[in-house]
Structure formats: C-alpha cells, structure tokens
C-alpha cells in the first residue's frame, strides 16, 4: 500500500478507535489542534511515564518541576523569542494562500528526491537481481544531475536562512519556478517574518494590563528556576531539571496530523554542567536518548541522527533524533548544547546572579547546559505509526482474513488485557468479573461479552491490547483460562492464579527502562 494511503488509514483509525480526535470537531474543527480520546490519553500518559521515570527515577542527579505556562514577558525578550522566533512567510496573490517560504523550498527539494527514488525503483525493476543500487546512484546521469541540483539548492537556501536574507529566499522560489499548490501560479508577495508566539492580556485593562505570551517551549521555566532548584535541593553540578508541559506555537504550516501542532506538549531536560565539559555530556545524552527510543523495538534502521551543520548563535553542538515516519525521516527529539546563553541572558535581563558556587574549586560561574527536548505528540505519532499494521492472516480452514493490529509495546499499551467470557451464561461472566476485580489494581483491564469471540479479538487488536483472556467451560472445571497473544495470535492455557505474574512480567515498564 502506498505510504500516503497507509498514513490516511492510520489517521482514520486513530479517530475510529478513540485515540485522537480533531479539536472542536462539531464546529468544523480548529486547525492543528487535537484532542486525545479514551485510549489516546492512556498511551500519552504511558509515554510521559516512560520518559519521566527514565530521567527522574533512574538518575539521582535529575529532579522534576512543573512551572507555569504564563511567565513574565521579559523572559521571552531575554531568551530571544520576541525578536527571533520567526518563520519566513510568503503569500500567493492569486489563491490568497499563505505559506512558509522555507517549507515551499523544502517541498521542492523533496520532489527532486522523489524523482531520484523513482529512477532507482524503475532501474531496480529493469535489472532485477543483478541491480546494484549503490553503483546506480553513483553513475546514473539523471540521478547525479538531480543530486547536484539538491546540493546546490540546499546550500543556497541554508545560507539565505542563516543570513536572514528574505529577498534571497524569495529569489530562490522565483528561480526554481516554485508554484502555489492551489492556484498553480508564481504570483508571490515578498517574504516577511512572522513571530510564532501566541500572546494574551493579563489583568484588567482598567488597572493596566500586561501583554504576556503562551510559552513556546517549556525550557525557559527550567532556566528561570535553576537557582531555586539548585539551592532548595542542594544540587551539585552536574545535575538536571526535567519538565513535561504544554507549549504553544502559531505554526503557519500545520500538517501531517499531530506532527506539527499549535498546542502541543514537550518533555524537556536541561542538564547543567561545568563549562568545558559540555561536549562530553552532549555525546553522553545523545547515546542515552537514542537507546531510549530504540528500546521500544521498532527497529534500529528507523532512527538516525541529523547533526546540525549550521548552529544557532547560542549553541556549540546540536543534533536531531529522526524517526522514519510514513512521510519520511523527521525530527522527534532535539539534543542541544546551549552553552551558558540562556542563564547569562536571564542574569542580564533580571539583574539577578544566575551562578553556581563550585565547592570543589571555590569559584562561582554560570553553568553550561545540555538540553534534551522531545515532543510528546510527536513521540505518540512515532509509536502509533510504527505500531499500526494491516495484515492478511491465513485461517486454519485455508481461507484468508485481514486484521488491523496496533503492535504497541505492551508497557505502553492503553489496555493491558481484555477479559472475554466465551458465552454470556453458565457463570462465565461472573468468573470474568471476578478476574477483573482481582487484576484491576495492577492493570488497565477491559470486559467485553458482545459479539463472537473472533470479533472481540479483532476489536482488541485494533486498540492494541496485548493480551486477551478467554473464559470458557473448562475454566469452571479446572480454574484455567486461555491467554491469546495479540502479535502472534497464539493461545496458551494458564491457571487463573498465575495470570497476574504472567502479565506483569510482560507489561512491566521496568523491562523498557532496564534497556
Ligand atoms: N527547547 C528546545 C526546543 O523547543 P524544538 O526543536 O523547537 O526545541 C523540540 O522543539 C521538540 O518539540 C521537537 O523535536 C518536537 O518533537 C517538538 N515540537 C516542536 N514544535 C512542535 C509542534 N509544532 N508540534 C508538535 N511538536 C513539536
């Protein structure tokens, strides 16, 4: 199935099975804002727990905080967001549609990439088993010409962005004959900057109100609390502060479902270190964070680092962890060595010292910071797109059937087990209820007695429940039940009093954290 169709089906599945809904849907929706349904919220909470425990539980030198969304407006001046948190915008005069100029160029580059992919696929078909992709890529004149086009365009475009040269960005669009996807014309306005922060008023206007911003990242709430945490927790360098919370960005191009949203959630950790040691810590956190992702078992080949060649003025190293989404490799997490930029800026703008007294050297200094920053929603999309599988199954009578299954890591699955009486009589529902009453303190359980057992299995597969427990007439005789495993569909007979132990071992988050 084409990746595009696969992604459309995934989005539809998320709605049909209570994972993600369009916000304000009955009012035709609010663009790039989403609500999480009954299963979505459980998966989201499990993702947050996996992250929080891996940071705060497993590291004695990392503590968590929960800072307010509203913060003093000068914080955003100090951090650079008021002056520089911008996207370059361009309008098409015919369609009246507004675009991010950088995205138009990136889409154009992606189209050239697609041409290369098509050449490779065509050649693969023509040459069959004797096809050597590497040699083809290195020698085919059309591939080489397109590759050169991409390289030239990428370097011109990166330079224009870095120099904040809006005229040059427009010129790139003109030179490459990029057209508006709606009107198909090249009738463009000039490119101008657009600040991504949402603002609101705090206080009544009669008393004089203050313009404040909805935070575009949670990190600043950590920076401004650095000394509060360090002093009250008697923390010694190196140490980290972790936070999970909402962030808001007025994204112009909000696409790809929950990949780019206007209201989203971040999990950020700022690790404060002695100046001069930050690049070692940067490498350390790169390794740890990649392992955290790969422990989920979605295949190492689906992750890669994208090291930033051009760095922001405050960073001395930065990388993204990218995951292979149905629409290609894209950033899920950023790891940035942010030097002492943020603390120094807050020191300057607040007039308060943001220094650490090092008892070992008896010196005071502004620590350097290595940050790990990941979007909860993007992590959610990573997991759900890797887990969503449509498969053909061969039945014992030789016929075929199909099923949709969410192969979620059991520790993250919203419902851990479903208890299904084979029939609605003969005491089987009562035994099922008793099992749930015993297990509900440990696991999120679901009871289902409606429809055939086959249909009930399919429903559980579709929401990603790793275990179905079937209660049948044999249960009334020997207190055993059947466990049916979601991924293999194999079944096993176990004693009721062994259920808790059998399931605990498989859904325990510690299994993930230990890796
Ligand atoms: N404090 C650093 C920071 O905010 P970022 O690269 O802008 O860095 C970090 O964002 C992560 O937040 C991204 O890797 C992504 O997972 C998530 N993120 C950023 N913008 C987002 C958006 N509009 N919608 C969903 N997730 C977003």
Image (cartoon, rainbow, N blue to C red):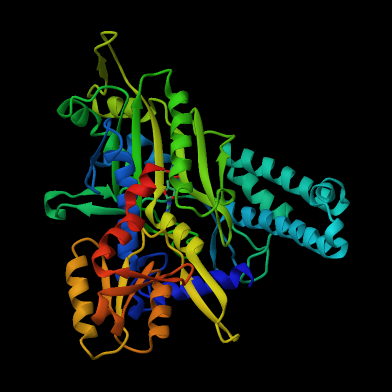
Residue 324, given in percent of the width and then of the height, sits at 56, 55
Asked if 380 appears above or below 226 in the picture, the reply is below
Looking at the image, the residue that sits furthest to the front is 478
**Residue 37 visible from this viewpoint:** no
Query: Which residue is at 54% across, 66% downward?
Result: 97
Instruction: Decide which of 130, 222 is in the foreground and name it.
Output: 130
Instruction: Decide which of 191, 35 is in the foreground and name it.
Output: 35
Q: Which image quarter: residue 229?
A: top left
Instruction: Decide which of 438, 285 is in the foreground and name it.
Output: 438
Instruction: Decide which of 260, 444 is in the foreground and name it.
Output: 444
Query: Which residue is at 36% across, 63% downward?
Result: 413
Residue 245, given in percent of the width and then of the height, sits at 29, 50
User: The N terminus appears in which quarter of the rendering?
Assistant: bottom right
Asked if 231 appears above or below 183 in the picture, the reply is above
Q: Which image quarter: residue 94?
A: bottom right
Looking at the image, the residue that sits furthest to the top is 362
Count the numbered circles shown. Answer: 0
Looking at the image, the residue that sits furthest to the left is 207
Query: Which residue is at 45% across, 38% downward?
Result: 335
Residue 410, given in percent of the width and then of the height, sits at 38, 60
Residue 57, given in percent of the width and then of the height, sits at 27, 40
Query: Which residue is at 30% across, 64% downward?
Result: 41
User: The C terminus appears in which quarter of the rendering?
Assistant: top left
**Residue 406 visible from this viewpoint:** yes
Residue 30 located left or right of residue 99: left
Residue 356 located left or right of residue 434: right
């Amino acid at each position: 199935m084409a990746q595009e169709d696969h992604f459309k089906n995934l989005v539809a599945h998320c709605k049909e099975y209570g994972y993600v809904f369009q916000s304000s849907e009955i009012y035709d929706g609010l663009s790039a804002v989403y609500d999480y349904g009954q299963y979505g919220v459980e998966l989201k909470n499990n993702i947050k727990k996996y992250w929080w425990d891996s940071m705060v539980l497993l590291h004695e030198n990392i503590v968590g905080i929960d800072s307010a969304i509203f913060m003093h407006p000068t914080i955003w001046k100090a951090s650079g967001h008021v002056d520089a948190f911008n996207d370059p915008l361009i309008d098409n005069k015919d369609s009246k549609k507004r675009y991010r100029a950088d995205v138009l160029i990136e889409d154009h580059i992606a189209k050239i990439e697609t041409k290369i992919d098509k050449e490779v696929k065509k050649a693969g078909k023509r040459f069959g088993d004797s096809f050597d992709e590497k040699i083809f890529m290195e020698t085919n004149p059309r591939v080489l010409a397109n590759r050169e086009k991409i390289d030239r365009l990428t370097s011109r475009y990166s330079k224009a962005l870095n120099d904040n040269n809006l005229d040059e960005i427009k010129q790139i669009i003109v030179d490459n004959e990029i057209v508006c996807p709606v009107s198909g014309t090249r009738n463009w306005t000039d490119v101008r900057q657009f600040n991504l922060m949402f603002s609101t008023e705090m206080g009544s206007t009669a008393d004089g109100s203050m313009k404040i911003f909805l935070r575009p990242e949670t990190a600043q709430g950590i920076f401004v609390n650095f000394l509060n945490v360090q002093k009250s927790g008697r923390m010694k360098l190196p140490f980290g502060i972790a936070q999970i919370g909402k962030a808001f960005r007025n994204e112009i191009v909000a696409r790809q479902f929950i990949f780019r949203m206007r209201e989203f959630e971040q999990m950020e950790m700022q690790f404060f270190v002695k100046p001069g040691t930050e690049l070692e810590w940067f490498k350390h956190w790169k390794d740890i964070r990649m392992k955290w992702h790969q422990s989920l078992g979605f295949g190492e080949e689906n992750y890669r680092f994208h090291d930033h060649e051009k760095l922001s003025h405050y960073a001395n190293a930065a990388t993204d962890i990218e995951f292979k989404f149905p629409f290609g490799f894209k950033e899920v997490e950023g790891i940035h060595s942010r030097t002492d930029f943020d603390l120094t800026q807050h020191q300057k703008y607040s007039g308060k010292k943001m220094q650490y007294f090092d008892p070992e050297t008896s010196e005071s200094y502004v620590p350097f910071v290595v940050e790990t920053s990941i979007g909860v929603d993007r992590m959610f999309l990573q997991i759900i797109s890797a887990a969503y599988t449509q498969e053909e199954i061969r039945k014992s009578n030789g016929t075929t059937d199909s099923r949709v299954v969410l192969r979620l890591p059991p520790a993250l699955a919203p419902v851990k087990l479903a208890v299904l009486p084979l029939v609605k009589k003969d005491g089987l529902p009562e035994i099922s209820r008793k099992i749930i009453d015993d297990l509900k303190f440990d696991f999120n359980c679901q009871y289902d007695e409606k429809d055939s057992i086959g249909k009930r299995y399919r429903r559980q597969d579709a929401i990603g429940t790793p275990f179905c427990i079937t209660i049948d007439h044999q249960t009334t005789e020997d207190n055993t039940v059947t466990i049916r495993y979601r991924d293999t569909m194999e079944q096993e007979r176990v004693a009721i009093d062994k259920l808790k132990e059998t399931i605990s071992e498989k859904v325990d988050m510690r299994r993930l954290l230990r890796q």
